[in-house]
Image (tube, rainbow, N blue to C red):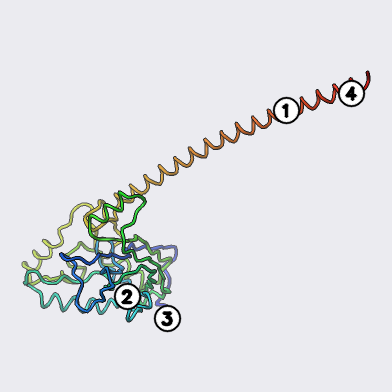
Amino acid sequence: MAPPAGKRVKGVQVFRPFIYGTTAKPFNDTDNLRPAGVSPDHTHSWQVFVKGVEDTDIFHWLRRVQFKMHESIPNHLRTIDAESIKKDNDELLATAAGRSGAKKPQKAFVVSETGWGEFEITIKLYFDSKSSEKPQTLYHHLRLHPYGTNEAEKEAMRATGEVPAWIYEELVFNEPFEEFYKILTSGAHDKGSAPPGGKAKGGKGKGKNAAASSLSAGASKEGDVKERSAMIPLTTKPGQPFSRETEEAEIKRIREADEKVRKMIAELTESVKASEAELESLRAQNRSAVAAGTAAKDSNSSA
């Protein structure tokens, strides 16, 4: 870890959202053939990843991710470096310019594998050297088979042919050092447009042509997420399950559950009170019966 750069920005917290998880798909004879050389025991292909919300760039603050998988997997400890990904992406853009159907740039730290069993994956996050932040560790269970709270949810997952197990997470940097604060908070721009002081991805030409290309690529709509920001989409999109919309739905679900629990507690409280009142009534009847019996015994003794 590099020595701290400058001073901390006092009284400031900066958060950055991201997604991590796995996506698994069973081998089949149509769109997911078992690759040559893969063991016949392996039933699924799967990926484990860390990426930005709506595939936004997180390589500027998250510089390296280490994935620790089951020891039965060859090279089970793998480290993915942001600089290597960016270098590959630059080479890809340079060679793929103008070609249709070209491979898309990589936007995530990802490991692709095949297998037959589920296990826990340890994910370790390393930040920019200017941050002086300690690595953070996450744990994620690889899921190969459809899951859910009921059969309907499982069947819906079976219908898609994939088993996604994605987690939305937020990292909070408390009073970051000045240099890291600049990295976190500078350079927000529309997707596809040129970052401040830079050029648009895949942009070509000079002058008006370059400006028009950048403007066209960066034309944003209300609710769009900007690169290098902490924005979250307003609505859910295919392949992008996390948004303000899903957040509101989750809040509503929690409130409804909370209301249900409160109602159950109130009903249980009333039931307990009724039982206590009944118990007290029985005790009073018992005391009266004992008192009456004692009085009758005393009366018989006097006679």
Tag 2 residue: 63
The residue lying toward the viewer, choosing from 196 and 46, is 46
Question: Between tags 3 and 4, which lies in front?
Answer: 4
Tell me the kind of residue under disc 4: Asp
Q: Is 119 rendered above or below residue 154?
A: below
Q: Residue at x 34, y 74 (%)?
A: 65
Which circle, 2 or 4, is nearer the viewer? 4
Image x and y of residue 115, in percent: 30, 72
Residue 284 numbered mark, or none: 1
Pointers 1 and 2 in contact (CB under 8 A)? no
Q: CA distance from mark 4 to mark 1?
A: 21 Å
Spot occupied by residue 118 in the image (x, y as percentages of width and height):
36, 67
Is 66 placed left or right of 193 in the picture? right
Pointer 4 local density, CA inside 10 Å: few below 14, some 14–19, many at least 20: few
The residue closer to the viewer here, 68 or 39, is 39
- Estimate the spatial distance between the alpha carbons at disc 3 and disc 2, rounded to whole Å: 17 Å
| Relative vertical location of residue 25 with respect to residue 221 in this rendering, above or below | below
Secondary structure of the residue carrying numbered label 4 = helix
The residue under label 4 is 298
Query: In which image quadrant can residue 93 be found?
Result: bottom left
The mark found on residue 3 in the picture is 3
The answer to the question of whether label 3 and label 2 lie on touching residues, with beta carbons closer than 8 A, is: no
Q: Are marks 3 and 4 in contact (CB under 8 Å)?
A: no
Position of residue 261 relative to residue 8, above or below, is above
- Nearest the viewer among 45 and 212 is 45
Q: Are marks 2 and 4 in contact (CB under 8 Å)?
A: no
Mark 1 or mark 3: whose residue is earlier in sequence: 3
User: As drawn, is 301 to the left or to the right of 195?
Assistant: right
Q: What residue type is disc 1 on?
A: Ala
In three-dimensional space, the C-alpha distance between marks 2 and 4, rounded to whole angstroms, equals 92 Å
